[in-house]
Image (tube, coloured by chain):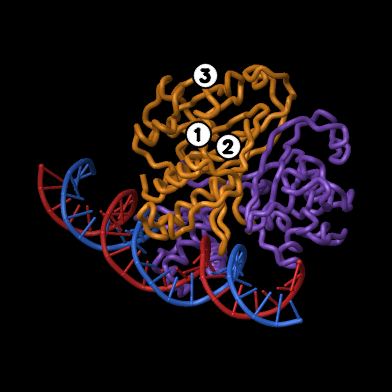
Chain colours: A purple, B orange, C red, D blue
Amino acid sequence: MLKYQHIAEEIENYIEEHKLQQGDKLPVLQDLMSQFEVSKSTVTKALELLETKGVVFQVRGSGIFVRRHKRKGYISLLSNQGFKKNLEEFQITSKVIQLDVRKPTTEAALNLNIGPDDDVYYVKRVRYIQGQPLCLEESYFNKSIVTYLNNEIITESIFNYITDGLGLNVGFSDMFLHIDKLTEEEAGYLGLEKGDPKLYVESIFHLTNGQPFDFSKVTYNYVQSQFFIQAVI
Amino acid sequence: MLKYQHIAEEIENYIEEHKLQQGDKLPVLQDLMSQFEVSKSTVTKALELLETKGVVFQVRGSGIFVRRHKRKGYISLLSNQGFKKNLEEFQITSKVIQLDVRKPTTEAALNLNIGPDDDVYYVKRVRYIQGQPLCLEESYFNKSIVTYLNNEIITESIFNYITDGLGLNVGFSDMFLHIDKLTEEEAGYLGLEKGDPKLYVESIFHLTNGQPFDFSKVTYNYVQSQFFIQAVI
DNA sequence: ATTATATATTGTACCGGTACAATATATCAA
DNA sequence: TTGATATATTGTACCGGTACAATATATAAT
């Protein structure tokens, strides 16, 4: 792990340990530098990270304060804001409906930047949050990158496997969403009625070198989500 | 405007002028430094900004490449990713339904961190995208911060007025969303049927010093939105 | 050709520094 | 007490540098 990521964790721990509440002041930059024995730029990068995660906000001339405007029951759809923690915090589990190697749809091939004859792993899952259906997820993985998948892996965390198991570096993702009505099939998987509202999210995940490796289409039920935004531009 | 923000704009212009497409390579860091006559850290900050806006991605040892995975018709709900541009690009207009000074609801007072007897500006608007109803928006502004509003201001851009007119510095915002069904009243404003799906978004906007000044509740119709995410953590 | 190996390229982490703007606090005047 | 003014605090922009990891390219070996 990078140094500044580690410092960010340390600062989160500090907040936890000292039971700091919303609006409470953290030690000043100078103190954080000496406390963790790192340079100013490292602390600054750590604090930037914590800002994007919505943990703190900084006021020039004043100090660093706890933000943490958290609402209970709201998960993060944006993977950079604690997506991993979602899984543990909300006891998200999943059931595999389908797993096979196949040729991509035109749409999948386009988004994965591969040809129609290249192989993909197709995965269809239902995810549950505290036992209740949360979403229906269809994923297409570029098989030349994600060379092997099995039932056990996709029941656990695919992304852990991709990073730790395959040694790949996940970089960025593009997400597209809209709202719509559930089809009969979707409603069936989620235990709802046809025509009920849904949040539909398409994501294309890329490696750090820009290669897309995962194209996913997720249909959410009555999901509640939380975002933290930085400065308006 | 800050130097690195300016460089970010210059780089966007460069992409435009040279008609760079997705995956095309930009000049290397060294060249950008000398071309714009700024230090490495300034270029780096500019590029960081462009990464969060989904314009470029950087690959160590390789170069800087154009991302711009844009889909037509998708707006940005996240204010840090070109919210302002939405207004021009999609010809978003608005009609004021109501504007008055009143006492806040319990909910608004809580989110604005004020007392029940403090005054707020209440604004109710319908926003249109290319003439079609897009959303119904109810906003509560802390009157001790946003001291004056009128019909003209809120028909134009409130945020322009807040920054340029009042000289306030907008810092960050917390957003919460979920999906639901339209009430009869909402459906009426949006020209839809009761029970149709909606995207409901609550936002709390803060000044750079952490003070909340705007609590807004927005009910979207069949909105399509696009997000750009950085590294998975 | 193909594969392994060395070399050059290139962005990023990290260091330490100066200048400054925004804010808070102390001081003084009315 | 109030309000203006000076002073100290504190985070951020910006500079320039070293070290290094990831990648691409050239070179050599098979």
Query: How far apart are the two marked residues, 2 and 1, measured between alpha carbons?
Result: 9 Å
- Residue A46: mark in rendering: none
Give me the residue at 49% from left, 50% from top. Answer: B49
Name the residue tied to disc 2. B76
Provide residue B182's location: percent of width, then percent of height: 70, 25
Local packing at callout 3 (Cα closer than 10 Å; few below 14, some 14-19, many 20+) is: some
Provide residue D19's location: percent of width, then percent of height: 48, 77
Name the residue tied to disc 3. B95
Give the vertical position of B217 relative to A228 (above or below). above
The answer to whether A227 appears left or right of C19 in the picture is right
Query: How far apart are the two marked residues, 3 and 2, measured between alpha carbons?
Result: 21 Å
Q: Tell if the residue under mark 3 belongs to the same chain as the one under mark 1.
A: yes
Provide residue B124's location: percent of width, then percent of height: 53, 23
Tell me the subunit letter for badge 1: B
3 or 2: mark nearer the eye: 2
Tell me the subunit letter for badge 2: B
Q: Nearer the viewer, residue B168 or A124?
A: A124
Task: Please tell me whether mark 1 sits on a helix, a strand or a loop.
Answer: helix
